[in-house]
Image: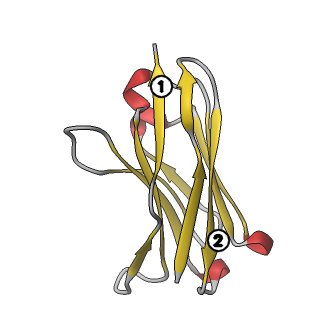
């Protein structure tokens, strides 16, 4: 199993960027996909979730600015990030999990830096 995250980089506050995460070796459409982030000196937090049925949930601080989506034909989950703020600066990780009791697979992380 492999999750490959890409996108992000350095962006200005107020701008947008999109993260992608391609999954290999799993039955993608059966897995709930998530984006987490870890900011410097802080604990990891769950940013967004999309279920196999396309239900979504968001961290309160990103609600209305971020959108998680998935393309099952491409085994890819996306995180569209709009109106970025400096406090969104973090390493973003994607994950895949089929059931609450099953193993959670992780991508390698991609850095997003938002400058003010």
Q: Sort mark 1 into few (<14), some (14-19) or many (20+) by Cα contacts within 10 Å.
A: many
Task: Identify the secondary structure beneath mark 2.
Answer: loop
Could you tell me residue 107's position as x and y percent? 47, 66
Whichever of callouts 2 and 1 sits on the residue coming sooner in the sequence is 2
Rendered residue at 61%/30% (across/down): 82
Q: Which residue is mark 1?
A: 114
Q: Where in the figure is residue 62, as x and y percent of width and height?
A: 47, 35
Q: Residue at x 45, y 56 (%)?
A: 109
Q: Which mark is residue 2?
A: none
Q: Is residue 23 above or below residue 108?
A: below
For disc 2, the marked residue is 53
Q: Is 14 placed left or right of 45 in the picture?
A: right
- Color scheme of the displayed model: secondary structure
Q: Does residue 6 lie above or below 8 as drawn?
A: below
Direction top: furthest residue: 116
* Residue displayed at 60% across by 86% down: 25
Q: Residue at x 50, y 52 (%)?
A: 57
Residue 5 vs 103, above or below: the answer is: above
Relative image position of residue 80 (x, y in whole percent): 64, 42
Which quarter shows the C terminus? top left
**Which of the 4 quarters of the picture holds residue 30?**
bottom right
In the structure shown, which secondary structural element does the residue marked by tag 1 occupy? Answer: strand
**Image quadrant of residue 106?**
bottom left
Q: Is residue 54 above or below residue 111?
A: below
């Amino acid at each position: 199993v492999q999750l490959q995250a890409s996108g992000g980089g350095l962006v200005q506050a107020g701008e947008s960027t999109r993260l992608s995460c391609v999954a290999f070796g799993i039955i993608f459409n059966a897995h709930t996909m998530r984006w987490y982030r870890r900011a410097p000196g802080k604990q990891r937090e769950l940013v967004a979730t999309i279920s196999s049925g396309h239900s979504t949930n968001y961290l309160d601080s990103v609600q209305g600015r971020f959108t998680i989506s998935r393309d099952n034909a491409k085994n890819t989950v996306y995180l569209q990030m709009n109106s970025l703020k400096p406090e969104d600066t973090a390493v973003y990780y994607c994950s895949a999990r089929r059931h609450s009791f099953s193993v959670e697979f992780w991508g390698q992380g991609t850095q997003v830096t938002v400058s003010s």
